Amino acid sequence: MHGSVRFAVTGQAGTIYTSTEAALHPDGSNILYINKNLETGKPLARVEQVYNRLCELAAVEGYTFRIDSENVGYPTGGGLASSAAGSAAACLALYKRLQEIKPEFELSEADLTRVARLASSTAVGSVVGSYAELKVTDDDAWGERIAEPGALPDLRIAVALVKGGEESDKIHAAMERSRYREARLAFVRDKLPEVRMAVADGDTARFIRCVHEDTLSFHGAALEKGIMTFEAETLPILRRVQDMVNAGRAVGCSIAGGPTPIILATSDEQEYVLSQLSDVMGEAQLVKCQIADRPRYV
């Protein structure tokens, strides 16, 4: 529907990440394990879309894959873009294996994002890492890195891990049908240049404000069609963050397809923000995070 600016996160000291291994075989069936569970249906079909496109680009036939992927330190399907991370990791791992079969096969980072987004449109941020922009035209979409991880040195990130959420396909369908669809698109068109400028200028407070406003816009459009990704533990956290926003604090929340609030604050606000959240967290686990660089693949 529209472009976006994404930021990739990992836990401090690398405690939140996706680890994926891929192998190719000259016969057999495609096999996908996620968190040691054998996956079929939609998860497997997503990866097969990526693999088939890579094989087409590489002009390689006759191989099937086995992928073993694990989400470490965060829940699968909880709103921290596990499908985006898994899709990107699968794309990069399969790309590397195909290069071993055909060493001359080379794709640009932009083309890798074009392939990874076949499984998850948000995977472009996981391929590029750091701060990435999803560029959208009438017949194409790809990702570009717009800043290095230290672009906003004053940014502090904490994630409240909340279980639950809504299927992404239902969210996408609701956004397409929402009566506020055009208002949502107009908001994004107006806000994207401001987000780019905030990152380029190192203006952390402005970046946080833009992210928080986008969260409210997104969920307003989704709620119109009865889609709520929040769980009971999400709401008191969001309410407390909104109270601090209303008080003029440099704090905000990013919540997209799941119930997990990603809480942003400037360094001088972080301890106050965390103390304010401590009495409304319930069973949610608060984890300090940081901007993640490009993924490593071998």
Image: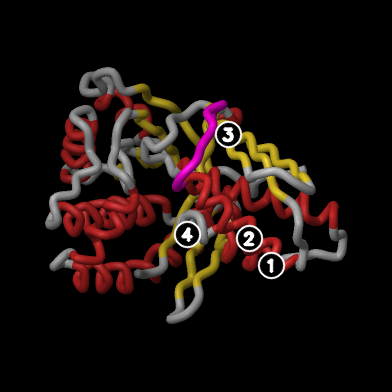
From the top left corner, tell me how far across and down residue 204 is, in percent. Answer: 42, 51
- Residue 199 image label: 4
15 shown above or below 195: above
How far is mark 2 from mark 3, CA to CA?
18 Å
Task: Name the mark nearer the viewer: 3 or 4.
Answer: 3
Amino acid type assigned to the residue bearing label 4 in the image? Val
Dot 2 or dot 4: first in sequence order is: 2
Task: Name the mark nearer the viewer: 2 or 4.
Answer: 2
How far is mark 2 from mark 4, CA to CA?
36 Å
Amino acid type assigned to the residue bearing label 2 in the image? Asn
How far is mark 2 from mark 1, CA to CA?
6 Å
Q: From where the camera sits, is residue 37 visible?
A: yes
Dot 2 or dot 3: first in sequence order is: 3
Mark 2 secondary-structure assignment = helix
How far is mark 3 from mark 4, CA to CA?
37 Å
Front position in the image: 209 or 122? 122
- Residue 52 image label: 2
- Which residue range is magenta in the image? 35-42
Amino acid type assigned to the residue bearing label 3 in the image? Tyr
